[in-house]
Image (cartoon, grey):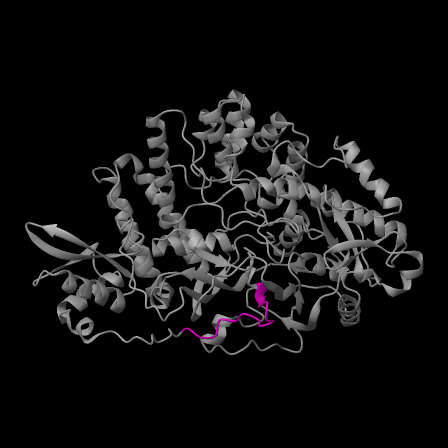
Amino acid sequence: MPGRPRGWLFRAALAAAAALLRPESRACLLAARPAPRPRSQAPGSLKCFLGALKMEMTEMTGVSLKRGSLAVEDNDSVAPAEEAKRQKVSECCLTTGRAGLENASPPSGENVLGPPGAVSAGEGTENSDARLEEEEEEEEDGLSEEGDEEEEAESFADMMKHGLTELDVGITKFVSSHQGFSGILKERYSDFVVHEIGKDGRVSHLDDLSVPVDEEAPSEDMLTVLTAEEKQSLEELQLFKNKETSVAIEVIEDTKEKRTVIHQAIKSLFPGLETKTEDREGKKYIVAYHTAGRKALANPRKHSWPKSRGSYCHFVLYKENKDTMDAINVLSKYLRVKPNIFSYMGTKDKRAITVQEIAVLKITAQRLAHLNKCLMNFKLGNFSYQKNPLKLGELQGNQFTVVLRNITGTDAQVQQAMNSLKEIGFINYYGMQRFGTTAVPTYQVGRAILQNSWAEVMDLILKPRSGAEKGYLVKCREEWARTRDPAAALRKLPVRRCVEGQLLRGLSKYGMKNMVSAFGIIPRNNRLMYIHSYQSYVWNNMVSKRIEEYGLKPVPGDLVLKGATATYIEEEDVDNYSIHDVVMPLPGFDVIYPKHKISEAYREMLTADNLDIDNMRHKIRDYSLSGAYRKVVIRPQNVSWEVVAYDDPKIPLFNTDVDNLEGKPPPVFASEGKYRALKMDFALPPSTYATMAIREVLKMDTSIKNQTQLNTAWLR
C-alpha cells in the first residue's frame, strides 16, 4: 500500500488475527511477535505470520491438511517425515524448522545416543562464521524471506508417485490367509494414538495436571516482599498482557539476602519468569523477563533447589503431530535451557497423538505446568520429582489405538483378520518410513557409505530428485547440480539444519577433497541412520526369502536366542520351537547366519552390492556394523477391536487423554452410517512397526505412495 511502511501491514494483520483467535492462541501469538526488523525483512515476517495464522485457523476447523502422509510407527524411533502444516502459532517464531532426514534409532541391539545437538560449521573465515550465526538466528525466528514453502505445480499425490512401494524394500509376504480389504490409515493424525508402556508395565496416561506441593513451604519473607502492584505487573508480564518485555523492581534495602529473597519470590510465584540483578544509575534493580521472550536471559540465575527434592522432574508429555525431538526443542526454547537436560525412554511418532514420560533436570513442576498456558498441541502433567533421569530403551513397548477409516471389509473379514493378528501376528518387517519418502531411498546412501564411495554419498544426498520436497530444497538441489558450489547451494536454503544444509556447510568448510570430514558435520545419529537403513533393507529381503523358502515353521539351521546369544536349531529340537522364536541377523561382524539356503542369499546380496559379508568393519569406526538379531514374526499383546459406523469423516472416533481431562463425552455411533471404520487396540515391543501389523490386517501396501492415492480418491 503506497505511503505505508511494510511493518504497518504486518502489525495490522497481527492485530486482526489476534482478535479472531481463541485466548490461549492469542496470548502465544502476541508472545511470538518479533522485534522490529529492517524493512527488507518485513515480507518474510509477514509470510511467517500469515503461514502461522493459516495453521491456527486450519486447526480450529479440524481439517487434516496432509492426508495419507505416514510418519513414524516404529515403536521407538524417528523416521523421515514431511513437515506438518498444523502447528502452534508462536512456534513459527520460536522454533527451528526441520526438513530433510530426521533422526532414526538404530536396529535393536545397537547403541543409541541421546538427542544430537545441532552441529554448526563455519565457511572458512570469522566473518562468514558470524554471518552464519546471524542467519541461523534469523532462521530460528522463522523470519527468513524464503522461509515459506512455495506452491508446487504438482499435487502432493502426484509427487508421491515417485515414492517407494513395499516391493522396493523387500516387503512382500504375509503370514495370514484371510482376504484383504481396503482402509485408510491416518486420514487424520488423531486416528493414531500411542501410549508408552514403562518398564514396570504401567501405561502412561495424562490424567492429572496438578502441581505437586513442595515439602519446603516458601518463607514468610517470600510472600510479603513484593507489593500488590509489583505482583500485578509480574502477572501481566507472565501472561503477555502488556507490551513490556521486562519488569524492574528496585531493591530498597540493598543486601544480598534481600535480593535473594526477591529473586526467589518472583520465581516461586511466577514460574514463567526469570530474573537478574542490574545496576541503574547507582541503584540496584531485580529485572524479570519472560522465559519465552526473544530477549530472555541467555544464562538465567539458577533456581534454588531443595535438597529433599529429587533432582529430576518427571512428567507425562501429551503431544499432537510432533516427533519427540521437535517437542523437546520447543520445550527447551520456552524454558531457555539446553535440550540435553531432557531424557526419555523412546522417541515417538510425528503424525500421531502420543503420550510418553519425560524427565528434565532441575526444572520445577510449576515452570513446566506454566507451558500449558503457552503451547498448543502439547500438554504436560502427572508431575513428580525423582532422583534419576530416564534412559533410552527402558520400556516394555507401546500401546496403540488406531482407526482405519472407510473400510470395505465385511464384518466376517474383519473378524478373521483380527483373529489372525491376535493368534499368529505379523512379519516383523522394517516399515516404509525407515527408507525415506523420495526417489532416493536412504538405504542407497547407506550402501555407498559402507562401500566407502564418498562422491556417490554426496551425490545421492544433494542431487535433484523426483518426489515430495519443499520448494527451497528443489532450488538448492538444482543449484548444486548446476554449479557444484556448496556455498551457492547453501544460499538457497532458508532452513540450514536439514541434512542437506549440514552437508553443504561441511563441504564449504572442508572442501570437496575432504568429503569424509564434510559428511561428519551431520549429527551422528543422522549419519548412522543411513547404514541402519541399509541393514533394514537387507533384513527385509532376507526374511521374505526365508518365508518363501521354508514357510511359517522352524527348520534346522534357523537361529533362536538363548539370552542374548544366538544358537542354531538342530534337527532333534525343531519341535521345541515355533516361528515366534526364530530370529534373523542384521548384517555385521558380530553375528552368525542361518545354516541353510538363506545364509548364501545374504552373501549373494552383499556381494552384488560390492560388500564383503566376512568383513563388515569399516575404516571409519562409526560405520563398522556389529549387527543384531530381530524376531521374524511378532504377536501383538492386548489385542481388541470394534467396527463403528459414522457419517462425518472429520469427527474423532474415540476420546484422547485431553478429551477425558476436559470431560468430553465419548462419541456415540449410529447402527448404520455412510462410512465404516475399524478401531483397533494392541501393544507392541520396542523397535517394531505398527504399520506392519496394520498391513497384515488389510493385506495392502502401506507406503505413502499408495495411501496418498487412496486418500485422494476418497476425497473426490
**How many marks can you see?**
0
Residue 154: x and y, percent?
Answer: 57, 40
Q: Residue at x 78, y 53 (%)?
A: 566
Q: Is the residue 266 above or below the residue 488 in the image?
A: below
Q: Quadrant of residue 188?
A: bottom right
Which residue in the rendered view is the most extreme toward the right? 572
Which residue in the rendered view is the most extreme toward the front? 307
Q: Nearer the viewer, residue 578 or 311?
A: 311
Q: Quadrant of residue 342?
A: bottom left
Residue 244: x and y, percent?
Answer: 19, 55
* Horizontal side of residue 711 vs 383, given as left or right: right
Residue 641: x and y, percent?
Answer: 69, 72
Could one spot residue 101 in this view of the protein?
no
Q: Quadrant of the N terminus?
A: top left
Q: Residue at x 65, y 38 (%)?
A: 624
| 207 in the magenta segment | yes
Q: Which of 638 and 403 is in front in this view?
A: 638
* Horizontal side of residue 186 vs 213, given as left or right: right
* Horizontal side of residue 223 vs 303, given as left or right: left
Q: Nearer the viewer, residue 115 or 54?
A: 115
| 229 in the magenta segment | no
Q: Is the residue 223 above or below the residue 523 in the image?
A: below
What segment carries the magenta color?
A: 191-209
Residue 681: x and y, percent?
Answer: 65, 69
Q: Which residue is drawn at 43% across and 71% down?
A: 384
Q: Quadrant of the C terminus?
A: bottom right
Q: Is the residue 106 above or below the residue 200 in the image?
A: above
Q: Which residue is drawn at 38% across and 74% down?
A: 212
Could one spot residue 452 in this view of the protein?
yes
